[in-house]
Image (spheres, rainbow, N blue to C red):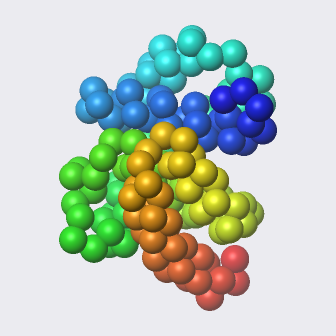
Amino acid sequence: MAGAGPRRQAREAALQVLFAADVSRQLAPECVLNAFEDVLKAFSLPNRARSRARELVLGVAHNLKQIDEQIGVASVHWKVYRLGTVDRNILRIAVFELLIEVDTPTEVILDEAVEIARRFAGERARSFINGVLDVVARSVRSEAAGRGA
């Protein structure tokens, strides 16, 4: 994570926490917080990145059902539970941001997800993640624009 800005560091740390929680099938908010503490013992993150990573993992945990529904609709022919754990959690973080954090530009969210996929997932995963997020973004961001958000 060295060399990355605090927001990228936070997203990468959040991915690692969510990966650990997902592998152990413990994605409830209190379990995610335990995973957060356990996983981040291994990292020296600036306070800003640490705080942001915590926001992301809790945001995903609290909104998991809605997030996974969006991923499921957008990933035609793929069940969310059948996706690779890394891919699934990169998508969850980005979909959380698309749904909840309307002030973050769509392009930034998609670009960050693809860059994180470049580092942690395979070549095919980047294209798949980009495609799924594009569908989700068009759906949720156009709905928000229609509501005047």
Asked whether residue 25 appears in the rendered view, the answer is yes
Q: Which residue is the extreme one toward the top?
A: 41
Residue appearing at x 30%, y 46% in the figure: 84
Quarter of the image containing the N terminus? top right
Q: Residue at x 37, y 72 (%)?
A: 74
Q: Position of residue 15 (x, y in %)?
A: 50, 37
Please say if 88 is above or below 29. Answer: below
* Residue 146 % position (x, y): 62, 88
Which residue is painted at 45% across and 19% down in the image?
Answer: 34
Q: Is residue 20 above or below residue 142?
A: above
**Residue 144 spot, x, y in % from top left:** 61, 78
* Left or right position of 140 against 149: left
Query: Can residue 63 be spotted in the picture?
Result: no
Is 93 displayed left or right of 121 in the figure? right
Q: Position of residue 87 (x, y in %)?
A: 39, 49
The answer to which of 68 and 87 lies nearer the viewer is 87
| On screen, residue 22 above or below 24 | below
